Amino acid sequence: MTDALIVFCTCENEQQARRLATGLVERRLAACVNILPGVHSIYRWQGRVENAEEVLLLIKTTESTFAALAHQIHELHSYETPEIVGIAISNADGNYLDWLRQQVQPGSAS
């Protein structure tokens, strides 16, 4: 098991997704964010079944940064209840994990 996470977050459009992704990487809350447009979501919200075209973010971060990352998503996101789901990365290339940890350093200037 590692301390690395992939966090799933859906956005209402690509503009919001890019703004969120850029903000998270700039603040060093994420090492990398993949933006996957064209996700069709079906979900229940306020008693109704909804259908929406969304953009999915795959955010690579660490467990120790998750709370700050979630807080930042809440600050920047337009949804009342954004999807913020962290999945532990149980296996990954050691070099990739080293790189990820070096990039995720909130409060660091570089």
Image (cartoon, rainbow, N blue to C red):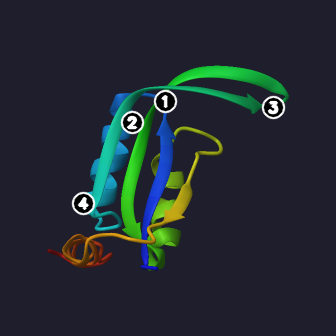
Asked if the residue at tag 1 contacts the one at tag 2, i.e. Cβ–Cβ closer than 8 Å, the answer is yes
First in sequence: mark 1 vs mark 3:
1
Q: Is residue 98 left or right of residue 92?
A: left
Q: Is residue 74 above or below residue 78?
A: below
Q: CA gap, disc 2 to disc 1?
A: 7 Å
Mark 1 secondary-structure assignment:
loop
Q: Residues within 10 Å of mark 3 (few under 14, many from 20)?
A: few
> Residue 63: horizontal and vertical position, in percent?
47, 75
Q: Residue at x 46, y 79 (%)?
A: 1
Q: Residue at x 49, y 46 (%)?
A: 9
Q: Residue at x 48, y 28 (%)?
A: 54
Instruction: Name the amino acid type tagged 3.
Output: Gln
Asked if the residue at tag 3 contacts the one at tag 4, i.e. Cβ–Cβ closer than 8 Å, the answer is no
First in sequence: mark 2 vs mark 4:
2
Q: Name the residue tied to disc 2.
A: 16
First in sequence: mark 3 vs mark 2:
2
Q: CA gap, disc 3 to disc 2?
A: 23 Å
Q: Name the residue tied to disc 1.
A: 12
Viewer can see residue 71: no
